Image: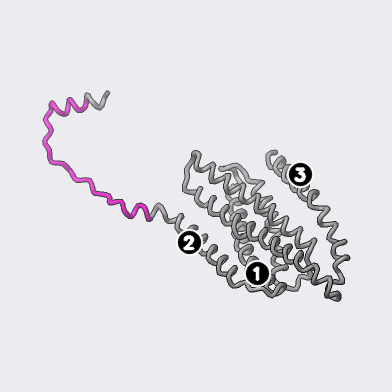
């Protein structure tokens, strides 16, 4: 019954998002008609290029924020929560994971609508092909996360495995698609992407390092603790002291 309620709630939320974004998708047909002759009219291309450049940049920023930042943050947060047994810190990490993933879904959906509305989706490059599959996997992962069963229930293990493998695939494909998006940006605008590639690679390297480091933090911290072995004492305890000690322990 709870699973059905979650499924209905998710369907309602997804329907609301689709209804809000549907006018932009429908208007893409009119946009394509009005811009269909841009390749044959150099003056129109020249006038539209600043707007097109802004739309491409905004699309790239939305997908970077979604796949290159929020998605890894959510993965690290839920990874850190595995070391927490219970309490306030565990709840905070869980909410960070949930909110970051929901924002990631919304931003990636907005980026998908922009690409449908404003760009020529001929699917002749890796960026567009990976992007189509990625959008579907993002919503599938959101659905899986929304249908999370209770801890200790029968299907919890299978759910965790599917959620983990799907989330890992989305994170890796998202990072790869940011790189392919930079290449598509270079081909579209002939602008240099060397600096942005270095910046994003530095960010990804830091995320990987932090992911591995926080997993080993307890082990590293325990290396500085010296556990001294217990040494037997050779003191002779008198019967009076034994009786006094037993009286104290009983209290």
Say which residue appears at 22% left-offset and 24% top-offset.
247
* Horizontal side of residue 122 vs 227, given as left or right: right
Specify the segment rendered in magenta.
220-246
Q: Nearer the viewer, mark 2 or mark 3?
A: 2
Between the residue at mark 3 and the residue at mark 1, the CA separation in whole angstroms equals 35 Å
Say which residue appears at 18% left-offset and 25% top-offset.
244
- Residue denoted by label 2: 209
In this rendering, the answer to whether 180 lies above or below 135 is below
- Residue denoted by label 1: 182
**Location of residue 96 in the rendering, given as x and y in whole percent from the top left corner:** 57, 47
Say which residue appears at 80% left-offset and 67% top-offset.
48
Q: How does the figure colour the protein chain or chains?
A: one colour
**Location of residue 173 in the rendering, given as x and y in whole percent from the top left corner:** 63, 64
Label 3 secondary element? helix
Between the residue at mark 2 and the residue at mark 1, the CA separation in whole angstroms equals 23 Å
Q: Quadrant of the C terminus?
A: top left
User: Residue 59 in magenta?
Assistant: no
Q: Quadrant of residue 35?
A: bottom right
Dot 3 or dot 1, earlier in sequence: 3
Q: Nearer the viewer, residue 239 or 184?
A: 184
């Amino acid at each position: 019954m709870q699973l059905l309620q979650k499924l209905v709630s998710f369907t309602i939320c997804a329907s609301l998002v689709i209804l809000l974004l549907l006018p932009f998708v429908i208007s893409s047909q009119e946009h394509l008609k009005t811009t269909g002759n841009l390749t044959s009219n150099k003056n129109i291309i020249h006038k539209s290029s600043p707007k097109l450049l802004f739309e491409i940049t905004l699309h790239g920023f939305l997908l970077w924020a979604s796949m290159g930042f929020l998605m890894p943050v959510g993965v690290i947060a839920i990874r850190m929560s595995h070391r927490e047994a219970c309490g306030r810190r565990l709840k905070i990490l869980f909410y960070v994971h949930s909110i970051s993933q929901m924002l990631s879904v919304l931003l990636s959906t907005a980026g998908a609508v922009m690409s449908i509305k404003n760009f020529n989706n001929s699917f002749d490059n890796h960026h567009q092909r990976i992007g189509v599959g990625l959008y579907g996997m993002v919503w599938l992962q959101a659905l899986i996360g929304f249908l999370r069963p209770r801890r200790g229930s029968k299907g919890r293990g299978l759910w965790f495995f599917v959620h983990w493998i799907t989330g890992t695939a989305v994170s890796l494909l998202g990072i790869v698609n940011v790189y392919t998006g930079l290449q598509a940006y270079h081909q579209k605008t002939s602008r240099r992407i060397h600096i942005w590639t270095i910046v994003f690679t530095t960010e990804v390297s830091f995320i990987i390092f932090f992911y591995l480091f926080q997993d080993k933090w307890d082990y590293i911290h325990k290396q500085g603790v010296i556990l001294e072995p217990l040494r037997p004492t050779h003191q002779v305890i008198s019967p009076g002291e034994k009786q006094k000690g037993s009286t104290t322990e009983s209290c």
